[in-house]
Amino acid sequence: MERTTCLVAGGGPAGVVLGLLLARAGVEVTVLEKHADFLRDFRGDTVHPTTLDLLDELGLGEEFAKLPARRMTDIQLPIRGRMVRIATLGRLPGRHKYIAMVPQWDLLNLLTRAASAEPTFRLRMNTEATGLIRSGDRITGVRYRTKDGATGEIHADLTVACDGRTSILRRAAGLEPKQWTTPMDVWWFRFPRNETDPAGAVWMVIANRFALLLDRGDYWQCATVIRKGADAVLRRAPVADVMRTMIAVVPWLADRADAVRGWDDVKLLDVKLDRLHRWHADGLLCLGDAAHAMSPIGGVGINLAVQDAVAAARLLAPKLLSHKISDSDLARVQRRRIVPTMVTQNMQRLVHRFGIEPSLSGALDVSTFERIPLPLKIFRSLPVIRSLPAYLVARGIRPEHAPDFARRPSG
C-alpha cells in the first residue's frame, strides 16, 4: 500500500506550487499528473505580478527571467485605424509592473525542477486520480490509473483536488458548484507577428465579434469570443471568415489573411464560471479551477489558483507535519481565499453583461466610432480610475506571499 502525507491530484500551477511549498516545509507530498509532459497548446500563459513576486521570494526569479517571455504593459484598442492605449500597468506598485507571457509548460518545468530538489517531493507523470478512498466518512486517499493501464491506491492524510474545472475528485466527493450562465465560448488560434506590429495586448470589438491579441514575440495568440454554443454552426462557414472580420478593424493584419488555414487550427474553450459552496470535505480540499472555474476575462485564473496554493501551504503545513489535519483547518483556507474569488468573479460577470453580451449582439461596434468616445476619454484622463482595472487584474485582492519556510535567496 502506497502512502504519503499530502496527495495532490493535478500538475497545473496550483498543484505544482502547492507541492513545492509543502516540500520546502518538509511535508511528504506526491503530485499526480495524468499527462507525460506539460506541453499543452493554448493553456493560460499569463504570469501576473503577484506570481512574479512569489517566484522572487522562492529564489526562482533569476531563473524565470531566462525563460522566453514577452512583457505586457499596455492594453490597446483599435479605433478608426489607430491604436489607442486604454490601460497601462506602469503605475502598479511593486517591482513587477507588467504581466509576463510565458509558455505554461516552461513555468511548470521550472517549478517542478525546484520541487524535485526537495527530498520529500514526488511527481508522478502519466498517472491520473480516478476516484477517492474513504474510511467511514473521511477521505483517505485516491485510486489512480497510469497510461499503461495499471491501477493502484495512494493513501494520504490530506488529498487536494487541483484537477481543474471538470474535477473528477470534486464530483466523487459530492461537492456541487454554483454555476452562472456565460454568454460566450472562446476560439483560440495563432498567427504570425511582425516587428512593426503594436506590442502588448490588443483588443478588438466589432459587430458580433470580440477578440484579444496577446503578443508572444514572433506570433500573436488570439482569443476570439463567440456566442455560447455557436461553435458548430459557425464552423460551417469558411475558416477565412475568422481573419476577415479582424482585418476589417485592424488593417495591418491584411498580409496574414491566410494564416488560419483550417478549422483544426482553431481550438474551442468551453467557458465556465462556477464556485463551490464548500471547498472541502473531511480529508479533501479543492483549489484553483476545481474550487472556482474562472472566465478567461483578464487571464486571472492561473494567478488565483497560485494564490490559493500559497495560502493553503502556509495554513496547512504545520498541521500536515504533525499529521493532525482537520476539516476546520481546511475551512480556514476557504475563508482566506473566498473574498478574492468572489470579487474577481463578480467583476467578470459585469464584463460579461456590459461588454461581451453587447458585442456579441452587435450593439457595441467600435469600428463605427469616428473618434474616441467621451466615457473613454474621461477614463483615460483620470490616472487613479485608469489604474484601478489594471491593478485588480494584475495584482488582485489579498495577494499571498511565500511563507518563511519556503523562501530562498536568489541565484
Image (cartoon, grey):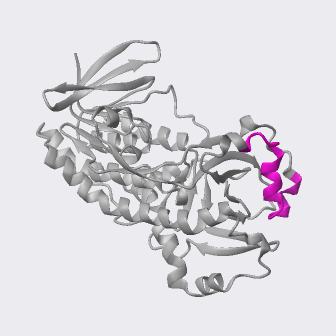
**In the image, residue 243 lies in the stretch drawn in magenta:** yes
Where in the figure is residue 246, as x and y percent of width and height? 78, 58
| Residue 76 higher or lower than 191, as above or below | below
Secondary structure mainly formed by the magenta segment: helix
The residues colored magenta run 234-255
Where in the figure is residue 234, as x and y percent of width and height? 73, 45
Q: Is residue 404 in view?
A: no
Q: Of residues 284 and 22, which is closer to you in this image?
A: 284
Q: Of residues 217 and 386, which is closer to you in this image?
A: 386
| Residue 69 higher or lower than 139, as above or below | below
**In the image, residue 202 lies in the stretch drawn in magenta:** no
- Locate residue 385 relative to residue 250 in the image: left or right: left
Query: How many numbered circles are shown?
Result: 0
Which residue is rendered at x = 16% and y = 39% of the image?
321
Where in the figure is residue 38, as x and y percent of width and height? 52, 34
| Residue 61 higher or lower than 361, as above or below | above
Q: Is residue 67 in view?
A: yes
